[in-house]
Amino acid sequence: FSVTDGNSNITFAIANTGELGLLTDAVRLTSTKVESNTNATFILSSFPANTFIGGKYIITGKKQNDVHISEIILTQNGTNAFWNVYGTSISNTSLYAFSANVSANMVSLLLTPTTNANVIYKILEQRITF
């Protein structure tokens, strides 16, 4: 389901995956759910380096009674990615760690789970254009 205003300046969309999105000419806001049962690093979010300068992320992870939530600011200069985790709350055990990179003009926020048990991640993402 997607709705766009008459000038194509604002788009609101809901995908079958449960992703919710709002896109304007300056900002993109999305909400996504990801499940993982491995401790292999995966791309949590990625975007074109020439479109977005960076973003703000709130990431939650939940495994039974373990809950981990973090807030991150990510920016890039076309060659390198820079991030700062400036808010974290953990109920019992840390469920993940972050890294980021720029490769082939794509900026990626990477998540490395600290467990191979089934963890449900929810991501709220705000991206800002140049």
Image (cartoon, rainbow, N blue to C red):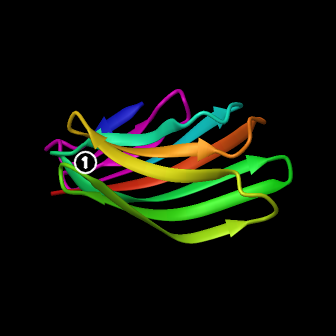
- Residue reaching furthest top? 16
Vertically, is 68 above or below 40?
below
Q: Depth check: 20 or 3 in front?
A: 20
- Residue 80 visible (yes or no): yes
Please name the residue that numbered disc 1 is placed on.
10
**In this rendering, would 40 be left or right of 67?**
left
Q: Which element carries disc 1, helix, strand or loop?
A: loop
Q: Depth check: 23 or 1 in front?
A: 23
Q: Is residue 106 magenta?
A: no
Vertically, is 114 above or below 86?
above
What residue appears at the point 20 percent right and 49 percent down from the top-left corner? 79
Magenta residue span = 5-29
What residue appears at the point 36 percent right and 34 percent down from the top-left corner? 2
- Residue 12 visible (yes or no): no
Instruction: Say what amino acid the circle numbered 1 marks.
Output: Ile
**Residue 113 percent coordinates (x, y):** 64, 43
- Residue reaching furthest right? 65
**Residue 27 percent coordinates (x, y):** 27, 55
**Residue 30 percent coordinates (x, y):** 43, 47
